[in-house]
Amino acid sequence: MRILVVNSGSSSIKFSLFDSGAAASVSEPTVVYDGELKDIGEAEAKVELRGPDGADFGLAGADPGRGRAAGTSAEAIRMILGIVSGPEMPGVEAVGYRVVHPGAKLEGHQRITEEVLRDLEEAVVFAPLHDPAVIDVIRAGMAKFPEVPHYACFDTVFHRTMPVEATTYPLPEAVRAEGVRRYGFHGLSCESIVRQMRAAGELPKRMVIAHLGSGCSVTAVVDGCSVDTSMGMTPTGGVVMGTRPGDLDPGVVLYLVRKWGGVDAVETMLNHEAGLVGLSGMANDVKEVRAAAAKGDEKARLALKVFTRSVTKVAGGYAWLMGGLDVVVFAGGIGEHDPLTRAEVLAGLQGMGVVVDLELNAAKGSRMRLVSASDSATKIFVVPAQEDLMIAVHVDEMVRTGK
């Protein structure tokens, strides 16, 4: 069965086609192609399309790599659906979508119906930055492929194993009854890491996963299950991120609402103008911030210190919460590709016996790899997140079982 996976973001949309085979005995879906449309909203969007070997997937019907306008998310969706439904492209038999927030009503990955879409539209209040765009993508996808089943895979499901004391906010019962609680995110990433660690025979008792990218989170995992995570009701909380501040004193938010123009202005600030961007005054690009810091830019230096310290604090706290720490995993665009961030985060954990091997840490690689020193009490891994594969795995299971 060929499964199209759509993973949409604010400035790009990733899309992949997986083939799960005809039999349930197939170990996991395999990649037919994967692509990404970047620079949505810019004068010229860039489409990349690659085969399983990383080479260009250059079918004429796909027209990959040509710059075309995708000034709005609707234009971007039409462009991608035009590519994947081209006459020379493999047929699509099911579609899976990464959905950040299910809201208070939906539980578990599931087939999309009109009722599910209505529930997702109600959930927009929980994730106004993410859910509206994916709802548009889903409706466009269902219109393009009306004869195949469509499925929503939620970024929160992995964290449903958190105990109630980890998910409950100390707020009045009437507020909590509306679904105001800690959900956690990057769940598909965390699940894919647990899956890879288990397959490699490296799944520990106590593990911290630092998913560091434009969005960042730290998750405590015991026996492969989430027991706590830094993000809360929305992906704005937790550790410092590219454009988001992470956790703030609630009084700061009230002050901003009173003094900076109301809820809409503050929401824009907290989602797009805070974090590393707000501290450095630069673009949302760690490489650029690091280059400036190396040249003596004090704002860039401070931004990096605040960022890595926030990750160290949460990781260290989770180690104490779990009674020890067997493995630290780094994932996400920064976590996987920036050795300095890894070293700076881990420097604050040396008192717990966490020691990185500087040579291994500096080496590049695209697969799961060990970067801890031989005398480290805790193993340190860099593991690529495989969110799209996890979506394909879940869709394949739901199609086969009808659940």
Image (cartoon, rainbow, N blue to C red):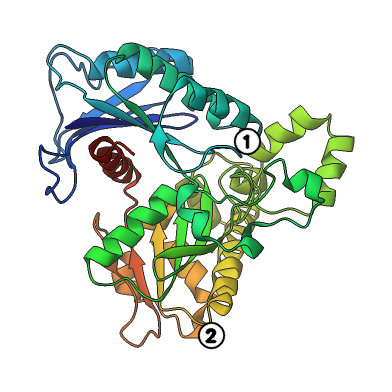
Q: Position of residue 387 (x, y in %)?
A: 35, 45
Q: Amino acid at mark 2?
A: Gly
Question: In the displayed structure, would residue 66 be above or below residue 27?
Answer: above
Q: Amino acid at mark 1?
A: His
Q: Is residue 369 left or right of residue 323?
A: left
* Helix, strand or loop at mark 2: helix
Q: Nearer the viewer, residue 310 or 80?
A: 80
Q: Is residue 62 left or right of residue 108?
A: left
Instruction: Check disc 1: other Cα within 10 Å, few if <14, some if 14-19, many if 20+.
Output: some
Q: Position of residue 181 (x, y in %)?
A: 67, 50
Residue drawn at x 49%, y 27% as measured from the top left: 116
Q: Nearer the viewer, residue 330 or 344?
A: 330
Specify the farthest residue to the right.
258
* Helix, strand or loop at mark 1: helix
> Where does the C terminus fall, quadrant-wise?
top left
Residue drawn at x 30%, y 59% as measured from the top left: 195
Residue drawn at x 23%, y 38% as measured from the top left: 400
Q: Is residue 366 left or right of residue 282?
A: left
Figure quadrant of residue 269: top right
Figure quadrant of residue 293: bottom right
Q: Position of residue 107 (x, y in %)?
A: 50, 42
Q: Distance from label 2 to label 1 (Cα)?
A: 35 Å
Residue 323 seen: yes
Q: Which residue is mark 2?
A: 351
Q: Which residue is mark 1?
A: 272
